[in-house]
Amino acid sequence: MKEKILNFFIKSIFLLISVIIGALIYKLIIKDCINIFITINLNVKKGIIIYNFFKLTTVMMIYSSFLILLRKKTCKFFKIFIAILYIGTMILLLFARFKIDRGFNLNPVQAFYTLHNKRDMMYFIGNIVFFMPIGYMLRKDNIFKVIILSISLELNIELLQYVFKRGYFDLSDIFINMIGIFIAYLT
């Protein structure tokens, strides 16, 4: 019984720390990164909900990281909740953009040539970090399965963005996102 109380207390402390760190990271970094991908209008209810959704996701990802580092067990509901937050964030960032013209970038290293300002760097780093959870979730699978799943996911995302005019079909995005997946997979 004492162990359960202590475990609850430790998790509560780390949740509080996650809220504080999450608020700081969101304000200093993530808010700017999100604005690169989508525009959030805080004058409407939908914008406020999306804004708070991203804040919650930030806090919960930090909290999850603490639990992983401390090797604390989590219940199945918590894992499902985190997965739903991540998938929701992915859908919002990838498909809640304004419609644009269709186009292609078939040069997989094009992004490396366009890193001239803070916005480009944040986009580059944001893409890497954004796809790292996938690599973490697949870390117990063999490398060939991870390669196939990652390429399939990336191709589908790029094709959907192209079809729905939410982004270009960009091989450099696929390459950058794969870097994020494999950084997490290999660590």
Image (spheres, rainbow, N blue to C red):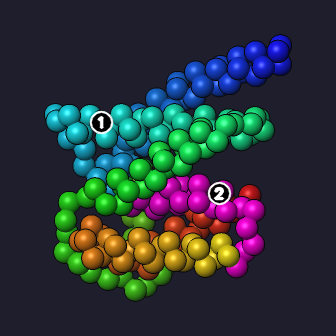
User: Cα distance, mark 2 to mark 1?
Assistant: 27 Å
Q: Which mark is residue 137?
A: 2
Pointers 2 and 1 in contact (C-beta within 8 Å): no
Q: Is residue 99 left or right of residue 184?
A: left
Residue at 41% across, 50% down: 88
Image position of 12 with respect to 48: above or below: above
The stretch drawn in magenta includes residue 122:
yes
Q: Position of residue 141 (x, y in %)?
A: 73, 67
Residue at 19% across, 75% down: 101
Q: Is residue 168 left or right of residue 110?
A: left
Majority secondary structure of magenta residues = helix
Image position of 153 with respect to 45: above or below: below
Q: Position of residue 92 (x, y in %)?
A: 34, 53
Q: Position of residue 182 (x, y in %)?
A: 65, 66
Residue at 34% across, 73% down: 160
Q: Which residues are magenta?
A: 120-144
Q: Position of residue 99 (x, y in %)?
A: 19, 65
Q: Which residue is mark 1?
A: 49
Residue 54, located in which quarter of the rendered image? top left
Residue at 78% across, 20% down: 4
Mark 1, secondary structure of its residue:
helix
